[in-house]
Image: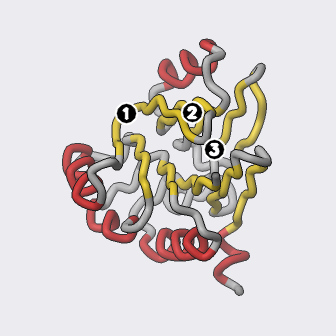
Amino acid sequence: MKIGIISDTHNQKENLQSALDWLREMGVKTLIHCGDLTDTELIQYLRGFKIYYAFGNGDAYSGEIDYQLKCLDKDNRADLALDLELAGERFFVTHGHQEALLNQALKSGSYAYVICGHTHCYCDEKHGDTRVINPGALGGLERDARSFGILDTQSKRFERILMDTIKNV
């Protein structure tokens, strides 16, 4: 299974559209968004994906985000933190601004993957048996190159995609 992972859109419509178009071209059907979409008008661009969304500190309209995601597909899920099983692996998804949630998931040792955002910095590292992935940010403060990624659960490979590389193609 290929899972698209994005975070911290911060109203950057062009980056979001480019990333989603690229994911569609790669055949990705499942999307994890680690929060801070910040503009509910951008939800329409997520159409066609099975979406798992973790509310971020910039998501003032979390109820509206949840409602609109459910309008796209009743099986879409949104919450402050998500405990998921995808392709036989256990995932914990959160934005990352509530460090206690993140630390609790890491300490539990219960997850194959902890997916988060918030820092706007790419990360792919192991904490014991748990792999922590932060895809970087599509918008907001530019602390690192703009990026997102694809996790292939079969090969366990995470491919970081830099926005500059797909915009120049």
Instruction: Describe residue 157's horizontal placement relative to residue 79 as left or right.
Output: right
Choose the circle earlier in sequence order: 3 or 1. 1
What secondary structure is found at the residue carrying circle 2? strand
Instruction: Decide: is 95 above or below 128.
Output: below
**Residue in the image at 53% along x and 31% along y:** 92
Rendering coords of residue 38 (x, y %): 34, 55
The front one of 130 and 12 is 130
Distance between mark 2 and mark 3 Cα atoms: 13 Å
What secondary structure is found at the residue carrying circle 3? strand
- Classify 10 Å Cα crowding around label 1: few (below 14), some (14-19), many (20 and above): some
Choose the circle earlier in sequence order: 2 or 1. 1
Distance between mark 3 and mark 1 Cα atoms: 16 Å
**Residue in the image at 47% along x and 33% along y:** 97
Choose the circle earlier in sequence order: 2 or 3. 2
Q: Which residue has dot 3 on it?
A: 134
Instruction: Describe residue 152's horizontal placement relative to residue 11 as left or right.
Output: right
Q: Amino acid at mark 2?
A: Phe
**Residue in the image at 62% along x and 59% along y:** 148
The quadrant where residue 132 appears:
top right
Rendering coords of residue 2 (x, y %): 64, 55
The circle on residue 2 is: none
Rendering coords of residue 123 (x, y %): 71, 43
Residues at circles 3 and 1 in contact by the CB criterion of under 8 Å: no
- Classify 10 Å Cα crowding around label 3: few (below 14), some (14-19), many (20 and above): many
Instruction: Describe residue 65's horizontal placement relative to residue 37 as left or right.
Output: left
Label 2 vs label 3, nearer the camera: 2
Q: Which residue has dot 2 on it?
A: 91
What secondary structure is found at the residue carrying circle 1? loop
Rendering coords of residue 8 (x, y %): 49, 53
Q: Amino acid at mark 3?
A: Asn
The quadrant where residue 130 appears:
top right
